[in-house]
Image (cartoon, grey):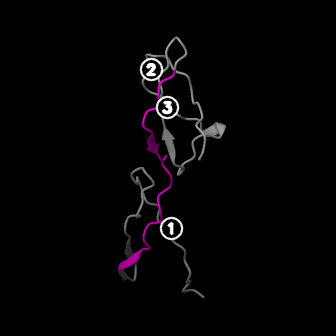
């Protein structure tokens, strides 16, 4: 079991925190984290930990399905594909379609 790491002592008026410690070896996309909070008072007493909040930061989407042929003619090729099974935790915003000419009719 991994030990808990103190992220930051926060004032009693603070009820939100953004963990953006990526550059410092902190948050890694695709890694599971669990966040807890405790309260302490001026006498130095610390209450029990809250129930943990499990979070996995956004990662890359899985591969989209291979393109399939929709139609073709002497001057066009139409293809389609299905969305990836996983969006990585964030909506897919675009697709990048690549092509490689593997046949050159001139030779």
Query: Residue 66, image x and y in percent?
Result: 44, 74
Magenta residues: mostly which secondary structure?
A: loop
Which label sits on residue 18? 3
Check disc 1: other Cα within 10 Å, few if <14, some if 14-19, many if 20+.
Answer: few
Check disc 3: other Cα within 10 Å, few if <14, some if 14-19, many if 20+.
Answer: few
Residue extending furthest toward the left: 70
Q: To which residue does mark 1 refer?
A: 98
Closer to the camera in the image, 100 or 20: 20
**Residue segment shown in magenta:** 46-70
Figure quadrant of the C terminus: bottom right
Q: To which residue does mark 2 refer?
A: 14
- Residues tagged 2 and 1 counted as in contact (Cβ below 8 A): no
At horizontal 51% and vertical 48% (from top left) the residue drawn is 32
At horizontal 54% and vertical 86% (from top left) the residue drawn is 105
Question: Is 55 in the magenta?
Answer: yes
Which of the 4 image quarters holds residue 104? Answer: bottom right
Picture mark count = 3
- Pick whichever of labels 2 and 1 is earlier in the sequence: 2
Closer to the camera in the image, 5 or 70: 5
């Amino acid at each position: 079991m991994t030990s808990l790491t103190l992220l930051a002592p926060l004032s009693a008026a603070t009820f939100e925190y953004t963990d953006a410690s990526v550059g410092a070896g902190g948050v890694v996309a695709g890694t599971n984290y669990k966040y807890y909070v405790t309260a302490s008072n001026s006498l130095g007493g610390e209450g029990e930990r809250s129930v943990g909040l499990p979070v996995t930061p956004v990662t890359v989407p899985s591969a989209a399905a291979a393109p399939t042929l929709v139609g073709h003619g002497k001057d066009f090729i139409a293809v389609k594909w299905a969305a990836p099974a996983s969006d990585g935790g964030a909506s897919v915003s675009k697709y990048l379609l690549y092509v490689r000419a593997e046949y050159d009719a001139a030779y």
